[in-house]
Amino acid sequence: MLMTTFLAAMETALSTIEATSVITLRMQILLQGGKAAEAEVELMVTEKMMAFTQAASDIAGGASHAEVSANFRSAIRANYHRLSTAKPNRTI
């Protein structure tokens, strides 16, 4: 039980660290303004709604904390990769 709680806490901490990097990269795009910023905001809101729906569905289906967290971390990593490899001042 203690190990499960510890692993859940570590998963949450790692997600927080990774999400902070994504927030920083997104803010850089948003601060530039323009079409790229508008597209990023639209994508961000859509992703949040989809993530909430998926998490609610997973939880209702009996998924564990680890499974739900793994899905979130996967999405966070994908966003980090997309944002960190994007060209500056890109147009979406």
Image: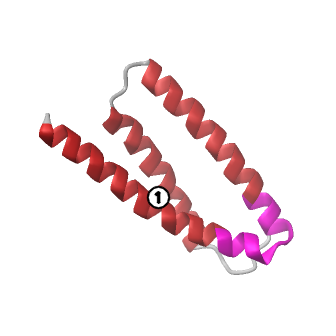
Residue 26, placed above or below residue 61: below
Tell me which residue sits at (51%, 57%) in the image: 78
The residue drawn where x is 22% and y is 46% is 7
Q: Secondary structure at mark 1?
A: helix
Query: Which quadrant is the C terminus positioned in?
Result: bottom right
What colour-coding does the image apply?
A: secondary structure
Q: Is residue 79 left or right of residue 44?
A: left
Instruction: Single out the residue that lies furthest toward the top.
Output: 61
The N terminus appears in which quarter of the rendering? top left
Can residue 26 be seen in the rendering of this structure?
A: yes
The image quarter in which residue 51 lies: top right
Which residue shows up at 44% across the image and 25% down it? 59
Q: Which x, y percent locates residue 22?
A: 54, 64
Q: Quadrant of residue 31?
A: bottom right
**Residue ranking furthest to the right:** 34
**Which is more toward the observer, 85 or 13?**
13
Q: Position of residue 85 (x, y in %)?
A: 57, 73
> How many other residues sit within 10 Å of disc 1, few (<14), some (14-19) or many (≥20)?
some
Q: Left or right? Give the position of 2 relative to 38.
A: left
Chief secondary structure of the magenta portion: helix
Badge 1 is on which residue? 77
Residue 34: give x, y in percent of width and height.
86, 71
Start-end of magenta stretch: 27-40
Q: Is residue 92 left or right of residue 72?
A: right
